[in-house]
Amino acid sequence: MARGWGRSEEDLGAEKEQAREGRGSAGGHRPEAEREALARGLRLSLARVEEQLGKSPSPARRQALEAARTELLERLAKLDEKRSG
């Protein structure tokens, strides 16, 4: 029977345990970290929409992209309210 890539099950178990401890170390800051991750994703989406908006010649496509941009900006504003409020 093949043994894999030469890593013992103990090594794999230790790596899993370290990863579990790393996730748990955020403690009470987890909701804030989740908000930051969500905001980062929204900013990336906003950048992509704005890039596409600059390239799109179609009026219908531009209208859809404008709507998407407006929604993303509103969602970012709500996240900022929750963070400061």
Image (cartoon, rainbow, N blue to C red):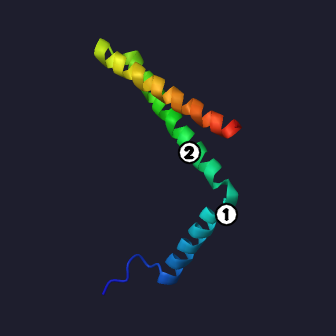
Question: Image check: 36 left or right of 13?
Answer: right
Inspect the image, locate mark 2, and give the three-letter code of the amino acid beneath it.
Answer: Ala
Q: Which mark is residue 9?
A: none
Query: What residue is at 38 percent from the left and 22 percent from the top?
Result: 65
- Name the image quarter holding residue 67: top left
Query: What residue is at 63 percent from the left and 34 percent from the top?
Result: 80
Residue bearing mark 1: 25
Question: Image check: 5 left or right of 1?
Answer: right
- Residue 13 is situated, as x and y percent measured from the top left of the image, at 52, 78
Residue 16 versus residue 28: which sits nearer the camera?
A: 28
Q: Measured along the vertical axis of the image, is residue 76 above or below residue 50?
A: below
Crowding at mark 2 (Cα within 10 Å: few <14, some 14-19, many 20+)? few
Inspect the image, locate mark 1, and give the three-letter code of the amino acid beneath it.
Answer: Ser
Q: Secondary structure at mark 1?
A: loop
Query: What residue is at 55 percent from the left and 39 percent from the top?
Result: 40
> Residue at the bottom extreme?
1
Question: Image check: 12 left or right of 80?
Answer: left
Q: Is there a contact, CB below 8 Å, between mark 1 and mark 2?
A: no
Residue 6 versus residue 29: which sits nearer the camera?
A: 29
Locate the N terminus and report the quarter of the image it occupies.
Answer: bottom left
Q: Measured along the vertical axis of the image, is residue 64 above or below residue 76?
A: above
Locate the C terminus and report the quarter of the image it occupies.
Answer: top right
- Residue 58 is situated, as x and y percent measured from the top left of the image, at 29, 14
- Residue 22 is situated, as x and y percent measured from the top left of the image, at 62, 64
- Name the image quarter holding residue 81: top right
Gap in angstroms between the C-alphas marked 1 and 2: 17 Å
Crowding at mark 1 (Cα within 10 Å: few <14, some 14-19, many 20+)? few
Query: What residue is at 60 percent from the left and 43 percent from the top?
Result: 36
Residue bearing mark 2: 37
